[in-house]
Amino acid sequence: MSTTKVQKILEFRNVSKFYGAVIGLNSVSVALPRGIIGLVGPNGAGKSTFLKLAAGQLKPSLGEVTILDQPAWEWKAKTKIGFCPEVDSFYEDMTGRDFVRSMARLVGYPKELAYEKADAALERVGMASRADRVVRGYSKGMRQRTKLAQALLHSPELLILDEPLSGIDPVGRQEMLDLFRSLAAEGKCLLISSHELEELEKLTEQVIILAKGRIADQGSIFEIRERIENLPLSIRIDSSERKRLAQTLLQCDEIATLDLPANLPQSLIVRVNTPKKFYESLAQFVLRENLPISRLEPLDESAHAILGYLLGGSGKT
């Protein structure tokens, strides 16, 4: 029986990065395959350091970062990277087309091919019809698209995207998500750092959660939740007999808190310490007491809740 080896596009091996006495990243090991990977974590978690090491902008203090087995710092690896930074620094008097064409020339393309590559990249990110306007007048979303165009010029195998959805309207955001999926389908590796956790959760095949310079967890949102057996969970339960339901649920040992929201007259909000045991107990109570239940909804089954639990905070990034 044959097995298919998953190719590692980006790999960190026992990587640490020190800024004097400050540790930016602490003994991180991770291997990223082709596909879409999300990077989340609070401010100061090490996300910027992680991205700069991946892009070859920084050298690790300890350990090794490689891209397709080439050290990320070396020029051969950098030819395989497309980097879209969070902060932009355009020549404001240039048009978007001139900017992307200039970036293509810096990549090393001769003039005619540079223009061809630039125009194709602008078309792909939805900027072709607006590329001849001066960058100074661009909206945040247009700037984001232009930065992405320059990152795509040389069809890199690794795309590093820092907050690529910031400032983009809902329609444009959906277009960008579709573009990211198509790039992943072409076999590229997309490392996306974003505060847009709900959108990221719909998009990513894998999430890396950074906390205090270390990887707190890694995997899909579902896999991460499955690994945390005693993850506290808030649940909304609606019943036409709310008072009787509340009195019954007070007998349940798994409940930490129980609230009766004034603005939701048929709802209870319970905070449970062991969700699996609670659901089993709830089923027994409902059957035994013949309690009507019209709604049963976890309130924090999202990236925000998992992030908050893992980091010991509110989940804000």
Image: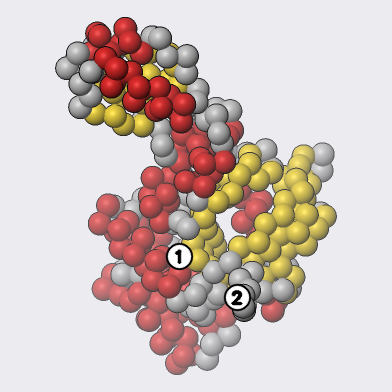
Q: Is residue 109 among what the camera can see?
A: yes
Which residue corresponds to the image point at 40% horizontal and 77% vertical from the top-left?
Answer: 121
Q: Earlier in the sequence, mark 2 or mark 1?
A: 2
Residue 67 vs residue 165, the one in the foreground = 67
> Which numbered tag is attached to residue 4?
2
The reply to whether dot 2 and dot 1 touch (C-beta < 8 Å) is no
Which residue corresponds to the image point at 38% horizontal and 52% vertical from the top-left?
Answer: 202
Element at badge 2?
A: loop
> Which numbered tag is attached to residue 107?
none
- Are there few (<14), some (14-19), or many (20+) residues within 10 Å of tag 2? few
Task: Examine the image and state in which quarter residue 72 appears.
Answer: bottom right
Element at badge 1?
A: helix
Residue 301 vs residue 123, the one in the foreground = 301
Q: Is residue 146 among what the camera can see?
A: no
Residue 23 shown left or right of residue 109 in the figure:
right
Task: Examine the image and state in which quarter residue 310 appears.
Answer: top right
Residue 11 shown left or right of residue 275 in the figure:
right
Which is in the foreground here, disc 2 or disc 1? Answer: 2
Which residue is tagged 1? 147
